[in-house]
Image (spheres, helix red, strand yellow):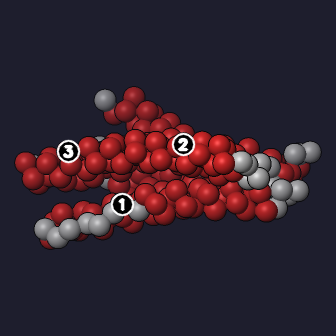
Amino acid sequence: MTGSLGLLAAAIAVGLGALGAGIGNGLIVSKTVEGIARQPEARGVLQTTMFIGVALVEALPIIATVIAFIVMNQ
Amino acid sequence: MSDLHEIYAKLRKMVFFVLALCALGWGFTPYPSVFAGLALGTAFGFYNFWILKRRMEKFDRAVAEGSQVRSLGTAIRFASGVAAVALAITFAEHIHLISTAAGLMIPYLLLLTERIIHQVRHY
């Protein structure tokens, strides 16, 4: 198991990753809702773009969480 | 641009193909633990996509009805990634850890590839 510094490093990795994902998701969702409000007929296209955007934004924080978990269990 | 369900169906097809390749690699190559890890990671990555699709549909309904959405399930997706790695750590002699972490990203790579191919063909 890791020491206290290792735990701190894991916490920072997860925290910063989640912060980035939160900001990114917030921007994507807000712009999508704005777009749907402006053009309700473009809902399908906006939803698809949002799906891809959210998926790609969340890829890196998931890897950060996984690596932090691996480091904690070394 | 194609519909969300269409993208999900294509992704499902590609993920099953990758899982079949992993099964072949597990059975016929000298690296069964690596392919087991890749398959486990891919399965959990695809589970993440399924959750995301479900939440997107919920979000769409909520926007149409004018109600609120609490979350898009980010914490669940983080937790499922950790669960895959926890399984790999628990069964370390059967499942390779790094390939599990790499396998988690395979559905994302497939999504990117599919979208790039779609853009090149249609625009």
Give the amino acid at mark 2: Ala
Residue at image position (43%, 57%) is: B74
Q: Position of residue B41 (x, y in %)?
A: 66, 53
Q: Which residue is mark 2?
A: A13
Q: Chain of mark 2?
A: A
- Using the rendered image of the protein, determine whether residue B107 is visible from the camera's viewpoint: no
Q: Identify the secondary structure beneath mark 1.
A: loop
Q: Which residue is mark 1?
A: B72
Three-letter amino acid code of the residue under disc 3: Lys
For marks 3 and 2, give the CA distance. 27 Å
Q: Where does the image place residue A54, in percent across and percent down from the top left?
A: 38, 48
Circle 1 marks a residue in which chain? B
Q: Residues within 10 Å of mark 1 (few under 14, many from 20)?
A: some
Q: Are marks 1 and 3 in contact (CB under 8 Å)?
A: no
Q: Which residue is mark 3?
A: A31
Circle 1: residue type? Leu
Evaluate whether residue B119 shows in this view.
yes
**Observer-nearest residue: B83 or B107?**
B83
Percent of width and height locating residue B37:
75, 52
Position above or below: B2 against B122? below
Of the two numbered discs 3 and 2 on the same chain, state the one appearing first in sequence: 2
B20 to the left or right of A37: right
**Chain ID of residue with mark 3:** A
Image location of residue B104, percent across then percent down: 61, 49
Q: Residues within 10 Å of mark 2 (few under 14, many from 20)?
A: many
Mark toward the viewer: 3 or 2: 2
- Alpha carbon separation for disc pair 1 and 2: 21 Å
